Amino acid sequence: MAAVLDLLQQRLTGHVREASLVHGTLALIVAPGELLVVVQRLKTEFQFDIFLDVTAVDWLGQEPRFEVVYHFYSTRHFVRVRLKTRVAEADPTLDSLVSLYGSARYMERECHDMYGIVFRDNPDLRPILLYEGFVGHPLRKDYPKEQEQPLVPYRND
Amino acid sequence: MRSTTIPIRPADRPAPSSAFEYIATKKDELVGWARKFSLFPYPFVTACCAMEFMAVSATPYDTDRFGAALPRFSPRQSDLLMVVGTVTHKQAPILLKVYEQMCEPKWVMAFGVCATSGGFYQNYAALAGIDKIIPVDIYVPGCPPRPEMVIDGIMRLQEKIAASHHPILTKDF
């Protein structure tokens, strides 16, 4: 395990609920309110300079329902770190990372499309992969598998 | 005419009095013959079937034999719309616009199983067959289809064109 990950675990103990090493990637579970602080420190103190991805997992039936997953990479230390946080269905809101990483603007839009996670302070959450007028969030487990929302009326003959 | 001559004209048709009049009875066949060897495909290529489309277009399969070798990248200059690959609901208005911009006469080929029926995509994103929005003349199934199947599809489309009535031919033409 890379030395930076050891150091990271020591210094962030106050912010992190749980830490584990999964296939060589450090996975940290944080509270939604702590997210921005933790990411800020990852970027400035530990040189995690690439924001790789944000996506969500829909644990239908559990509460809180959505697990939002972030990945970061450090081009200084050549390691990845994974952040997980949970938000409830009633208020699926998280802080946006746009102020730290410009690329978050688009990845958060996709996550908003597919799972309906709302990223506070993201200035533009218009559909990016879906189209205007699409109702619902198709990667949620309760979206009907074959429900179509066609833009062109179907032919009758 | 000697009695030993084999008549090539069907017995139930009146004998044409001249060669011109004979051709006049065959106008549909004549126009169909001309049109079937003059297909200008518009490749509406959206997905992995494109690789197979390139294989068909390449020299070994020589689609120029069927007069269908030269893709036109303007729908206004083409008469065969080849829909190659998956069409999503987001893409569907573009496909419809391309189809509507093509001049008559026009034909549509659904190339591959996704364009034919949506294939294994049964979800929020994919259109389950382009025939839900535009009429299709020939379906070429396969994921992707072999070049031989595409050529078979072109030949069957040619048969269809040759056998059909052409609205350009009126009573006075």
Image (cartoon, helix red, strand yellow):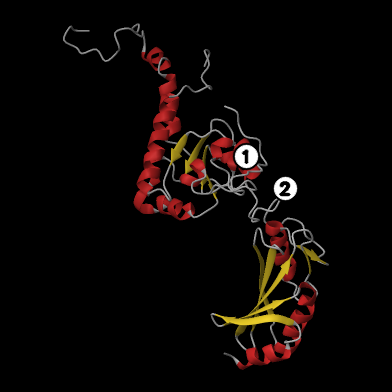
Query: Where B167 sits versus A114, above or below?
Result: above
Give me the disc on residue B96.
1
Compute the Cα span from label 2 to label 1: 23 Å
Three-letter code for the amino acid on which mark 1 is drawn:
Leu
Mark 2 Cα shell of 10 Å, populated few (<14), some (14-19), many (≥20): few
Residue at the image point whose x is 69% and y is 91% from the top:
A10
Answer above or below: position of A20 versus B7.
Answer: below
Tally of numbered discs: 2
Quarter residue A31 falls in: bottom right
Residue B20 appears anywhere in the view:
yes
Question: How far across and how far down the image is residue A21, in percent?
Answer: 58, 82
Question: Is there any visible trace of residue B41 in the rendered image?
Answer: no
Of B89 and B33, nearer the camera is B89
Q: Secondary structure at mark 1?
A: helix
Q: Quadrant location of the C terminus of chain A?
A: top right
Residue B10, horizontal then vertical, whole percent: 30, 12
- Name the residue tied to disc 2: A135
